[in-house]
Amino acid sequence: MKPAEKEWTPKILAFLCNWCSYAGADLAGISRMQYPPNIRVVRVPCSGRVNPYFIIKALQRGWDGVLVSGCHPGDCHYISGNLVARRRFAVLKDLLEYLGIESGRLNFSWVSAAEGEKFATVVKEVVEKVKALGPAERLVKR
Amino acid sequence: MNNPYIPNPTVIRRITTENDANDIKTFELVFTDPEALKNFRYRCGQFAEISVFGAGECPIGIASSPTDQGYIQFTVKKVGVVTTALHNSEEGTIIGVRGPFGNGFPLEAMEGRNVVIIGGGFAFTTLRSLTNFILHKTNRDRFKDLTVIYGARNPGELIYKYDLKTWGQRDDIDLNVTIDQAVPGWTGLVGFVPAVVKEVAPSSDNAIAIICGPPIMIKFTMPVVSELGFSPDETFLSLEMRMKCGIGKCGRCNIGNKFVCKDGPVFTFKELQMMPKEH
Amino acid sequence: MVVFQMVWKVIGKNKIPTLIQELNKEYEVFTPVKKENLVFFERVSSGNEAFLDFQNTKKSPKEVFFPQTEILFTYEINKQGVEIEKAPVLKRDIVLLGIRPCDAKGFLLLDKFFSSGEYKDLYYLEKRRNTTIIGLACNRPLSTCFCTSMGGAPFGKEGMDLLLQDINDKYLIETVTERGEKLIKKLPWLKDAENGDIDKVRSLSRNVEKAIKSKVSVEGVSKKLDGMFDNKQWDLIHEKCLGCGVCTYLCPTCCCFDILDEATTKWKRVRIWDSCQFSCFTLQGSGYNPRPSGKERMRQRIMHKFNYFPKNYGENFCVGCGRCVQECPVNFDIREVVEAISTDIWREKDE
Amino acid sequence: MHNVENSIREAAKKLLSEKKVDLIVGYERGTLPLRTTPCFVDKAEDVRKLVWNENCDANLSKYLLSRKENVGVVAKGCDARSIAVCIFEKQIDKEKVVIIGAPCLGLIDKKKVKAKLDGRELLEATIEDEQIRLKGEGFELVFPKKDFICNSCLTCRHRNPPIYDVFTGEKVSEAEVDEFGEIADLEAKPAKERWEHFKEELDKCIRCYACREVCPLCYCKTCFVDQTMPIWFGKTNDLSDTMIYHLVRAFHVAGRCVDCGACSRACPMNINLREVVKKTEKIMKERYDYTAGLSLEKIPPLGEFKIDDSQEFIK
């Protein structure tokens, strides 16, 4: 196929907590679990580090989807970073969806370091969802 | 007609770190287009708009002297978006230059007279240009005695140390370099610029004073300079303002009805006294 | 000055769409359009979009020549270096239809400003030079219109190439400049006006001018402001101003801008409107701000309009359109300020 | 109304003459029909200037931020609530503010009036009982006042200031209203239609920041759009930039916004900005059962968390 005819595949930006999901992704890799190669990972010290601006900026820059993944409630390395983040993301997600951004573009998950399989599943599901939505258009700055 | 908003490309040929804090660097730029170099004819005291591609644009005083052939220099302190991006640039990076803008120093008025240059801190850049211009062999005869008083917080913050060294070795310049507080190993003058001006007491006889520095230095130096007998219309100051266009259109650098970018940045003390105190 | 024959034509109101359609073949036509309750100038593609039964547009037409966001040039950073691509030039000439006399006067002031000095602003001037302005006289000025105080008039021809004057079911078209005449010649189907109609608009013009009740004594204000930079009244008048940009953004003459670089698919250097009322307008990199509070910023706006600009260009930088009065969220009324300055209330209070 | 106006003047006079405050911030007559303008009174004899009517629409708590002197302020229910938020957030010193609470029966929305007159200019308006009389060149119309009440007032449940130091007039009954009814239709629409709707609305934005400047809770010294290190989002009137500006502003006032409606009233381009911020209010209510500005002690939702917070959106 010529490059122009190449099938579109989504680009997904993933913010992974260093203490859990990042290790979870690692485990998935070491365990040779298959998941789509559409995510680009930004390692963050905690899901609480993910400023809503990061997510909005990603959407503006044309990322087709965003995934934020942190530790399960109660497991945060910094005790409550993920709990603070949870409220923040709830409001952000509700608000973005209300404005008309497709809900499938914003994804959040709790994945521990032991859950390599869950990580692979989450990525698979996210990629499927975003694929179904097609390339991002709303909020993208041209 | 030339579009004054389009920058001319130049290449960074050399980067010199000027101070110990590592936040002031001198960038030596060469034009890629020889035509652009020819058109870039500047006077001491003028400035140019520097484009760091991928970041933006900001006005910077020209630190080289028109007698320096083939290149221009800008000494930049790292403060905002553009200057930070510039500091992060390497030699060989393409930088845009628009200008030169502004009026520059009154070289014609200075001819045949004594010149007293007073500068403080990082604002010394265009004064360095002027000093080098006067000291150049083709120009030195056109001016009489040259006194330079330059102060910085500490020896590490003195910029153009290489120039200070060469100037110090010459006998046709009275160079007075001072630092705010004594530190071990420093053998030069100690004290704030105003005090040193008082001490050096350059004669105002047939002399013109050129002053540039932080507002606080200006505030305390002006009374001293007046006391020494420099008349307000023979005392020149170079101002700084937030600017965008550099050509008197964007509307933010005005002091009263004067624009610092096009009517300045050099004003006589007399002019400044007539202008609103909003700078 | 070129002498040309003054011609009066007439066009039925129902023929306006035809006129626009015809102009559209050759020009980029901008007219007032109405969207919900807002009337502002927009590029129209069909004749029916034009809305001429307005009193004053919400936004001033300055954005046709001085858009809120304008690309100065685009560039690409690649291995070879930086490639600068200049912004595309105008493809076709512009016709601006439905410009009120106050806004036309605003253009003349902007012309002076953008064409002055050593460096000309080509982005503004290129569009401006290739524009024919078809004005629309004001039959129903607003209560906040004070154009007559600022040297304008509801039937003013200053800055117009052609002027439409509304008499019931038709507009009388007065040719004002050679450029206007040229345009008229392209429209041979326009009928000549009758003398009765011309008399009618003349008397109408007088009556409407008389109907403008809002008067501001601006005479001598510029001189008086010379000594008022440190007047204590600045401390008081700015107090209710919240520092938004409504007045400056809607103003037909305010034209301060910011320049910044933006990345999308390409890098762009854009200029965007900026306002002297914003605190970051003069904020320097060092953190120092010569205009640190609302007081200085308010003073800048008033002084710029009534002292600095008159000093540099011999005219007030205000045309009396009343937009800032109408739209200020806290009802700050510039007329009151100018009036107070002119009647020496400020000077007396300061003593 | 006159009763309240007199009590406001009396209260102001008392506060000034007893030197309890240095300044009263209230409303005076504006220069246009249906307008009042903020007014600053520092002499007891000047309290005559103060007015109270359905056009006292500015949220005066904005003028209390970073004041050094003691200030008395005229406050409606919503104004008092935003003052409460600012006191909690330490932007207003409680000790320096005397709230002259006034009962509110709803503000007149001059944009609704304008829409009704459809291009005809209003020259005079009088409000008597429940009727509003609009006069202009060649017309005189009478409408029920309720036709022109601001939407923010129609959904208000706190007409009486929940906090105050002096109360003027008599408390009014609180209405039972459907607080979030006005956005229900929009919420029910598919995402694409919502997007189209907001696209059309926010495309009008000219970035004058009137919404931000009138908002008592937008007190950041440097707004996120003005930040330069880094530059987060663009300042152009490009749709993506304006959308994000309004989205983030709404996000920033989430759990703090008291729905005073000042943003909507201030917008020169008639954008119904409340539509955006109202949603944050609803989220706060539904997810965290919180209403802003009712207490000086309660921590707002985004300042705390619970281990069992809703997380249906997290995998």
Image (cartoon, rainbow, N blue to C red):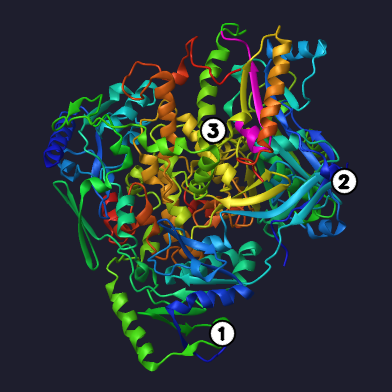
Residue C28 drawn at (x, y percent): 60, 69
Report helix, strand or loop for mark 2.
loop
Indicate left or right for B22 with C274 as reference. right
Q: Which chain carries label 3?
A: A
* Dot 2 and dot 1 residues touching (CB under 8 Å): no
- Sequence-wise first label, 2 or 1: 2
Indicate left or right for C204 with D131 as reference. right
Question: Identity of the amino acid at label 3?
Answer: Leu
Report helix, strand or loop for mark 3.
helix
The span from disc 2 to disc 1 (Cα, nearest Å) is 52 Å
Residue C187's label in the rendered image is 1
Report helix, strand or loop for mark 1.
loop
Residue D152 drawn at (x, y percent): 33, 38
Q: Nearer the viewer, residue D169 or B179?
A: D169
Q: Do labels 2 and 1 share a chain?
A: yes
Which residue is located at x 60 percent, y 45 percent?
Answer: B240
Which residue is located at x 46 percent, y 36 percent?
Answer: D188
Residue C80's label in the rendered image is 2
Q: Give the range drawn in magenta.
A: A55-73
Question: Identity of the amino acid at label 2?
Answer: Gln
Where does label 3 land, which residue?
A96
How packed mark 1 is, by other alpha carbons closer than 10 Å (few <14, some 14-19, many 20 or more), is: few
